[in-house]
Image (cartoon, coloured by chain):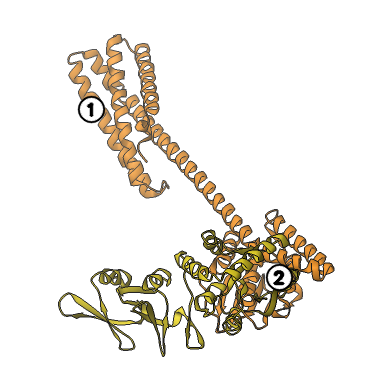
Chain colours: A orange, B yellow
Amino acid sequence: MSNPLIERLKHFYIYVIVWLVISILQTILIILASDLKLYVAIIDSLVFNVLFAFLAVTVWYPIRYGNPEGKLSIGIVITYLIVGVVIITGWLYLGYMILKLILIDDETYFSFLNDSFIARLATGILYYGVTLLIYHLFIYSKELEAKNLNEAKLNLLVKESELNVLRSQLNPHFLFNSLNSISSLTISDPEMARDMIIKLSEFLRYALKHGEREKTRFSDEIKNIELYLQIEKIRFGEKLIFEKEISKGCEQGLIPNMILQPLFENAVKHGVYESTEPITIKMSCESVAKSMEICIRNNFDSQQVARKGAGIGLRNVRNRMMLIYGRDDLVHVRKSENEFEVKLQIPQI
Amino acid sequence: MIKTIIVEDEKLARDLIKDYLENHEDFEMIGEYEDGFSGLKAINEMKPDLVFLDIQMPKLTGFEMLEVLEHHPAIIFTTAYDQYALKAFEHNALDYLLKPYSKDRFDEAVGKARERVQSGDAESINRLVEHREQLEEEIHRVVVKSRSKIHVIPVNDIIYLEAQDDYVMVYTRNSKHLKQKTMKFFEAHLPAEDFVRIHRSYIVRLSEISQMQLYEKESYIVILKNGVKLPVSKSGLPKLKKKLDF
């Protein structure tokens, strides 16, 4: 951050005008309070004020670099005091020196100068205090701006990840294959075709509703998952087996909307799609202390070659859990020779 | 009669094809298979004229099947959503059906197949395989055939590869297989973080390298964990150094 007083031309003009106004006020004050001549009063005001205007610019640097975090501590207060003493002493000393040079033998002026020492010291302290205050206001507003920008960025990130979730939910492969199955059923079993259209519609409606609320009741989520699995079962028949074991406390628990869907899709994709033998997807849920533990497990063809790039769904789940609960230790994945398991721990507050 | 086989893992999708095909009396359905492996065997044994082939299937994908087919029938791909496949088809005369498809669209594809079978053109499969090679997807397994047997080698089992004229010898822990592919193909499609091409004739798995030795001046060899020594070429050395990070 550069010095805000001279950072922009506009700031600089304002700064100059402020000091001009102060100088004029001081001139008027001197004329009223003493019997000095006008030009002497003007010189006095200009010398002291121009000098302080320059010194105030330098005050920025110890503030900014001696205290980069902008927090107040004893060390900082001491620094400010020392800087203050140096600045004010330097200001008064230089002011006296310069005026002595300009107004070499104006005796009345020098007696006025000496008499007004206390007033000048007080003015210096006031100026210094105001300078500090203005600088801190600048820093504060800049930080506020940066914070707002950060927040906006974070919001964008959240939106983006939600979009990703949505995209992974409406898996086109699943959708088009299901439509093809319906197309086939219209010939062989129209009633079943109708049944499947209704299931698919209900599933899509639920998926599209996502985003209205962040969390949903576990029992609703399970209903939707079962809808999805029923559709896949129409396609794959006996190859897909689903078992669930849900303890009583779980039904009413709240979980992030559609958080389980990508996990079941993975189980179907890497289990059922890739195998010629039946695949069992088991789900269990237990209510432990102030959280729910959901476990989704599926076997897979051990001959199957591990595919990379399977991580998108799982990564989305991790990201969402992180965004919602602010913890990265809630998702656990375990893979053995022929079994894949994901455990979700969902805090209930 | 045009002998036809379906290789497709969903029963309903197979039923649809059979149903649509009933109107075409010059086509005879001689078999249907649920996975790439059994489909491959059937095609090689029964030598059909036409195959309806799904791409995403258990055991072997439709593409992997094509690579090792001995017999080359006309192929109609059926797929739901496969951006890679679509890309490949864009440059290819072969037909494909995007699920779900209409009866008209199906009839059109079957019409093309009829023409192709009658003209006896099989070249397009090779073209399709070539197009797949240009796509930048990573491979997970290598399918090879030796005499009548088909082997599926997981990429994770490969230790190193050696160029042999128009072929590549694929070495695993306890076997080796000849594959009709180029070194360039493997260099482009094996996972780049695991393999490095150290020589015009050699690609090696990084984790299998046990040491590197200076051999004559300025030329190196690597010694693998199984004791095999392979030369490192001048252009291979910087690649190897970069991947091993030294």
The answer to whether tags 2 and 1 share a subunit is no
Q: Which mark is residue B13?
A: none
Looking at the rendering, which quadrant does residue B214 occupy?
A: bottom left
User: Residue A12's spot in the image, x, y percent?
Assistant: 36, 27
Can the viewer see residue A327 in this picture? Answer: no
Q: Decide: few, some or many residues near mark 2? Use Cα within 10 Å; few <14, some 14-19, many ≥20.
A: some
Can the viewer see residue B134 in this picture? Answer: yes
User: Residue B54's spot in the image, x, y percent?
Assistant: 62, 71
In which quadrant of the rendered image does the N terminus of chain A lie? top left
Real-space CA distance between mark 2 and mark 1, rounded to the nearest whole angstrom? 99 Å
Amino acid type, label 2: Ile
Name above or below for residue B147 compared with residue B123.
below
| In this rendering, position of residue B43 left or right of residue A195 | left
Residue at image mark 1: A94
| In this rendering, position of residue A271 left or right of residue A77 | right
| In this rendering, position of residue B91 left or right of residue A226 | left
Name above or below for residue B143 compared with residue A103.
below
Q: Which mark is residue B17?
A: 2
Query: At x 45% / y 80%, what residue is drawn?
Result: B156
- Looking at the image, the residue that sits furthest to the left is B217
- Looking at the image, the residue that sits furthest to the bottom is B174
